[in-house]
Structure formats: C-alpha cells, structure tokens
Amino acid sequence: MTPAADAADLVITGCTVLVHDAEEQAGFRHDAAVVVRGGLVDAVTTADAVRGLAAAERVDAHGQVALPGLINCHTHAPMVALRGLAEDLPTEEWFNEVVWPVESNLTERVVTLGAELACAEMIRAGVTCFADHYFAMDAVAAVVARCGMRALLGEAYFSSQGERGRQRSLEFALAHRGAAGGRITTALAPHAPYTVTEADLTATAGLARAHGLPVHLHAAENRDQTDTSLARHGVTPIEVLDRTGILGADVLIAHGTGITERDLPVLARATGRVAVATAPRGYLKFAWPTTTPVRALRGIGVPVGLATDGAASNNSLDVWESMALTALIQKSTEGDPRWLTARQALHHATLQSARAVGLDGVVGSIAPGRRADLILVDLTGPHTRPVHDLAATLVHSARSSDVRTTIVDGRVLMRDRELLTLDVPETVRELERRLPALTDRGHGRRVRTYDT
C-alpha cells in the first residue's frame, strides 16, 4: 500500500484487527489499517502505510479493535414487538397461551416496525447480518434493503396452511434472492418437523435442490421434542430430516438442544451442508435440561453459529451476550474449563457463523476479497482494562455497548454510536400505538397449537 495508490472508499486506521491465518487460527494485528474499495476489504496493512492515502471517508480507530461483523444465525426480528409479553412460562404455555394467539393479530405494518426496531438494536450491538424466519417477510426484506444490513431471509410456513404456505415460501425466496445489491440471500423456511408434515418436508427438500436454495427450520429444539418424536414415530426429529431429504439440501437447524448421540452419524453422513444455530439465553429461560452439543457437532464437522432467537423468548438480540454464554455454558456442560476457550468462541462468532448462514468466503473474516462487514469495538473503558489476553477481554469483558462503529459492504451504518440509517424514536412511537391491537387475546385464535 503506497500513497500513490488509487483513492479508497474508506480507510480505518490505528486499530487492532482480528485476523485469521491459513489454519483459521485467530490472531491480532496491532497498529493496523483496513482499506475498503467497492464494498470489499482491499487490504489489511499498517497504519503508517495508509498515512498519505486519499480516501472518501476515514475513521480514526485508535484504542479500538476491528472485528468481522457479528452474525445472528437464527432470529425472528419482528418479534421484538412481543419482548417481555410472555415471561416465566414453560414452552407449551408460552406458545399456546401468548405467542401464537398474539401472532394471529400480526399485520404487515407491525412486522415492518418490529423489523426496524430489531435492525436498529442489532446494528448497535455490532450485528451486520442475521438469519430470519418469520411471516410477511416482504416487509422485512424492505427494511433490510433500507437500513443497509445483510440477511438470510425465509418466509415461514406450517402444513396447516396447505400447499399455499409452502408455495409462498418458495415465491418469496425466488423473488428476493440477491436483492439489496446482493445483501439479501434467501431460504425455504418450514417451521419445524412437529408443525410440518413429512410430505411437506419431502416436497420442500425437492424444491430446495431444484432451485439451489437452502432450508432454515427449527428441529430437535429441546429434548422433549426428541422424546415425543421417538414415542410417536419411532424416529428423532433429525432422523425425520434425513428420511425426508432435508439433509440432502443445505440446511440451517435452529437450536438442536435435543440432538442425541444417535443423531450424530446421521448428521455426519448428510450430503447437504448442515449447520446448527445456538441461542443459549433462551434455553436458560425455558429451563431446558440440555444445550446445543457444540463439541460433538464440531467433532463431526458441523459448524455451529451463534444466535439469539426472537426477543419474545430471549428478550435481546445481543449476539455478544450469546458468545459469552455459549463459552460459559459449554464449559459447565462439558465439565471442562479448557472448552470453550475465548479464541474458540471468537471462531464460532466469525467463521463458523458465516458458514452457518451460507456466506463462507464472503464474510466472517477481515481479509482482502471479503465483503467489508466489520465493527469497531472500544476497549478503553474501565471494565476492559487492563488487557492481558485480548481474546478473553473481547469475549468475557467487552459488551455490545462497546461497539462504536458498524459497517456493512463498506457503508457506515453506525458511527460513534449514532445510527445513520434508521429513525428509532419514530418507529417506537408508531409501534407502541399499535400494541393494544397486537396483544389482544380475547378472540381465542392462535396461528398453531404447540403439541410435542
């Protein structure tokens, strides 16, 4: 990099950069600079090397760490409108008595407002990409296009909707694939094996292969679902995915805390790309007895990405918290303080999460040729000093509120904690006006019945 080089679109200078070597081991480059051109990382170099480089925009990031943007590998963004509405309930009551009755009131406008609020929350927490699985997803896609984030989107469906539900999921995926300048990718989104018949799952697998689309669904969310499936059908939810052909397509499985030892060889021999998203905060709230078997899945080559689930169950879209909780819960579950290390947690937050959402080689690291999705984290606060182990500081001491700047495709979406693409106060005002109609449960309807 020389001062004579062509002007850059963006130069970030003076920071420490998380980098990966050829073996994907995380390391840190100090007093570094990142050069962005055409939405791509053009170079990771030294601060001295860019001192005279012309740039349309410069960010002085002294005292900050540049990380790949975080990825929320499974959420329901518009459900922020239900945050705190269904508290301290077991799973069945949570669905049947609150969430599914309220969701029967959903309008496209509420979905839009919820998605705006969710995207604002995620941008402020350093999330640059999210995988969403919900209703009225045309509205979510429009919000993503406006606010500048990256997303994997799928229109959810139940078999109770008939063939039209599955067809609508396909139509959405084909209509929006590659939208927003390529920032939107799409998936087919059957809800789960307990709400979608094997015939519909088989048909979905065929559509996925025919159109080159991934599948994003819930499966083996908890151990009760696995036990019920075994009692009723003689197979686990993962075995249902196998015999219906879903594991022959690329598939992102949400949660998987009910994945058992007998499921591991099934997943290992899958012919499609299989990934799992873990959202540990919700599992603690629901008092589920198991968590995602991250170590076992990594042992068979299945990437595990970090997620939050929807804010109706998790109350937060903070992937930073998911990273710390994943590391801590894995230590406790495995009875091994050496697992999951801070560097391993960063691996899940970056490269593993990118693989989970089908963006391997596109995002997940700060390297030449990758999309310029990155965040700047301020480590000058008292809760992050001193720094003996930078990876541990990032995972266990830093907070989402330490994110100062969020960048997607080289575009700054938040700078010095100021959101640049969303108007949160106006969104909140309108959403709160609509809450009485949204939360009314007097009608006795629900979109589905949870019975596993």
Image (cartoon, grey):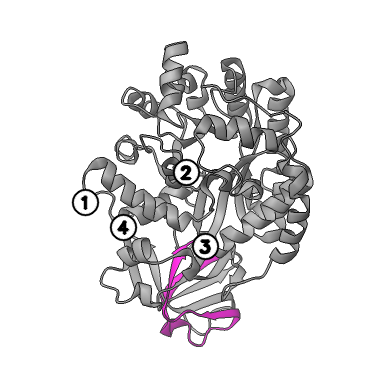
- Magenta region: which residues? 40-68
Q: Residues within 10 Å of mark 3 (few under 14, many from 20)?
A: many
Query: How many angstroms separate mark 3 from mark 1 (CA)?
Result: 27 Å
Q: Are marks 2 and 3 in contact (CB under 8 Å)?
A: no
Whether the residues at callouts 4 and 3 have beta carbons within 8 Å, the answer is no
Whole-percent x, y for residue 43 in the image: 47, 70
Return the residue at label 4.
343
In x, y percent, where is residue 6? 58, 78
Label located before the other in sequence (4 or 2): 2
Q: Nearer the viewer, mark 4 or mark 2?
A: 2
Of marks 1 and 2, which one's residue comes earlier in the chain?
A: 2
Label 3 vs 1, first from the N-terminus: 3
Q: CA distance from mark 2 to mark 3?
A: 20 Å
What residue is shown with label 2? 282
Q: Position of residue 64 (x, y in %)?
A: 43, 75
Residue 131: image quadrant is top right
Question: Label 2 sits on what residue type?
Answer: Gly
- Evaluate if marks 3 and 1 touch, with contact meaning CB atoms under 8 Å apart: no
Q: Secondary structure at mark 1?
A: loop
According to the picture, the residue beneath numbered tag 1 turns out to be 338
Classify 94 as above or below 367: above
For mark 3, give the secondary structure: loop
Task: Tell which of 24 and 16 is nearer to you.
Answer: 16
Q: Earlier in the sequence, mark 1 or mark 4?
A: 1
